[in-house]
Image: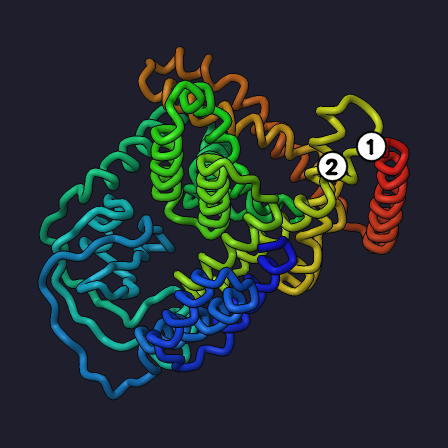
């Protein structure tokens, strides 16, 4: 399958998820079997369209229809936390999975305080009432696979959950424990960058980063996966091919659970898993094909991802990097490592700009220079922060402060860049910076095209 055919397959899978028609699964399976047997790319494209439509229809059917006529139901038993609890005012918000269905919970008082002490994937024994969601909130909840609401009266007991849940929670606890030597704001930014725990980030910090076009740095992103594999590569290279593949896949799955299966991390982990599989089979797959296959697989498994802004921001940024980074790097002056890092940042901003305009109605004026200044430093925190944070969690306070010293300087730099760029939104700046950005990218593409042409 060529790159163009893989991209077409991804587009058809997305369109199928948006259409959501009741295509019989036996028919979809027949098309898939025939496509694999005769190796016909057009049949694979058709299969993606049909599967996306069929699974999307089933997903919508699973969350039901908005109705207040369904009676409330008393419940007493175990429930699994789907997300980490968040305190909103005096109320705790969490999503619980009960009998393989998700329920939205807003709990105050003693039940809220008990739930707040728990974390995602742990099990709690609760008493309460299950009821359908109000029609005005149905679609927003349905896109998160939530079928109703629960009023919790009491939280009786809890357990730490599966071995995976215990492992990820111990890691998060160690990182949080080591980060106590940082200030509250720096600690919240550090945990958001490394593991996506952005619950304690103050609104002023989030506003600054979003206003500077650095909102993706307040939470975990697909970049973290690349840096995780870079940290683990010395160990993985020592393993035999089969064990290297198994350990890579296990590490990717563990990190996805650690970061609570954020859409951008899912995209990156699936891409990395496909790349590891292709490498293990002795095949070469282009980044564009890997991205298209990852999008196809993810939207078929979870059709509601087509409505996730975080997923599309991640996909669009990666698309920009895949299409433009190499060409931009060839046209940038300076050392090779600096040109490549700047090209990745520039191309990601070019790719994400259209989606940012559609989702947020605008793109930050200083996003381009802010990302050039912030991305290399954020990459350092993502790479150094995880092993250093775990080490700091096992050391006494003054030792942890020394280990976190480089992180502290990096975090303060990121806050400085975000605060400065967010405050620079003057009326004349938007058209000037936008025009300058277009001219700069165009000039770099032209220069890189000449550079590539001269080498042939």
* Residue 382: % across, % down: 51, 30
Q: Are marks 1 and 2 in contact (CB under 8 Å)?
A: yes
Q: Which residue is mark 1?
A: 332
User: SS at mark 1?
Assistant: loop
Disc 1 versus disc 2: distance between alpha carbons?
A: 8 Å
Q: Residue at x 32, y 67 (%)?
A: 146
Q: Residue at x 52, y 54 (%)?
A: 293
Q: Which residue is mark 2?
A: 343
Q: Residue at x 56, y 29 (%)?
A: 411
* Residue 77: % across, % down: 10, 60
Horizontal side, residue 33 vs residue 100: left or right: right
Mark found first going from the N terminus, 1 or 2: 1
Q: Residue at x 53, y 39 (%)?
A: 283
Give the vertical position of 417 relative to 57 (above or below): above
Give the vertical position of 170 relative to 262 (above or below): above
Give the vertical position of 100 relative to 231 (above or below): below
* Residue 5: % across, % down: 61, 60
* Residue 429: % across, % down: 84, 50
Residue closest to the eye, 252 or 341: 252
């Amino acid at each position: 399958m060529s790159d163009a055919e893989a991209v077409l397959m991804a587009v058809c899978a997305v369109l199928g998820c948006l259409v959501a028609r009741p295509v019989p699964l036996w028919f979809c399976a027949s098309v898939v079997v025939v496509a694999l047997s005769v190796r016909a790319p057009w049949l694979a494209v058709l299969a993606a369209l049909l599967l996306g439509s069929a699974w999307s229809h089933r997903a919508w059917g699973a969350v039901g229809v908005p109705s207040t006529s369904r009676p409330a139901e008393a419940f007493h038993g175990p429930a699994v936390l789907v997300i980490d609890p968040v305190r909103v005012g005096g109320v705790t918000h969490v999503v619980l999975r009960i009998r393989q269905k998700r329920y939205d919970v807003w709990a105050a008082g003693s039940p809220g305080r008990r739930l707040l002490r728990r974390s995602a994937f742990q099990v709690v024994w609760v008493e309460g009432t299950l009821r359908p969601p109000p029609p005005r909130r149905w679609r927003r909840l349905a896109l998160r696979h939530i079928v109703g609401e629960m009023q919790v009266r009491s939280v009786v007991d809890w357990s730490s959950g599966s071995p995976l849940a215990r492992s990820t929670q111990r890691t998060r606890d160690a990182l949080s424990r080591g980060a106590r030597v940082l200030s509250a704001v720096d600690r919240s930014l550090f945990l958001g960058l490394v593991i996506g725990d952005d619950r304690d980030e103050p609104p002023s910090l989030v506003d600054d980063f979003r206003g500077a076009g650095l909102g993706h740095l307040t939470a975990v992103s697909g970049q973290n996966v690349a840096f995780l594999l870079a940290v683990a590569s010395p160990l993985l290279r020592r393993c035999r091919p089969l064990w290297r593949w198994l350990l890579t896949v296990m590490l990717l799955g563990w990190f996805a659970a650690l970061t609570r299966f954020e859409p951008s991390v899912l995209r990156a982990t699936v891409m990395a898993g496909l790349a590891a599989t292709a490498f293990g089979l002795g095949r070469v797959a282009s980044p564009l094909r890997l991205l298209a296959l990852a999008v196809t697989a993810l939207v078929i498994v979870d059709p509601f991802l087509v409505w996730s802004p975080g997923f599309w921001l991640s996909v669009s940024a990666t698309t920009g990097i895949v299409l433009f980074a190499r060409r931009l790097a060839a046209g940038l002056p300076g050392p090779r490592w600096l040109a490549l890092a700047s090209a990745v940042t520039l191309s990601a901003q070019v790719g994400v700009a259209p989606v940012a305009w559609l989702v947020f109605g605008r793109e930050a004026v200083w996003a381009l220079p802010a990302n050039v200044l912030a991305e290399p430093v954020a990459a350092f925190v993502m790479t150094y922060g995880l092993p250093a944070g775990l080490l700091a969690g096992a050391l006494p306070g003054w030792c942890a402060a020394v280990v976190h010293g480089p992180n502290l300087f990096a975090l303060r730099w990121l806050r400085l860049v975000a605060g400065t760029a967010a405050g620079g939104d003057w009326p004349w700046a938007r058209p000037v910076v936008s025009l300058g950005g277009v001219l700069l990218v165009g000039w770099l593409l032209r220069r890189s095209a000449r550079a590539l042409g001269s080498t042939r």
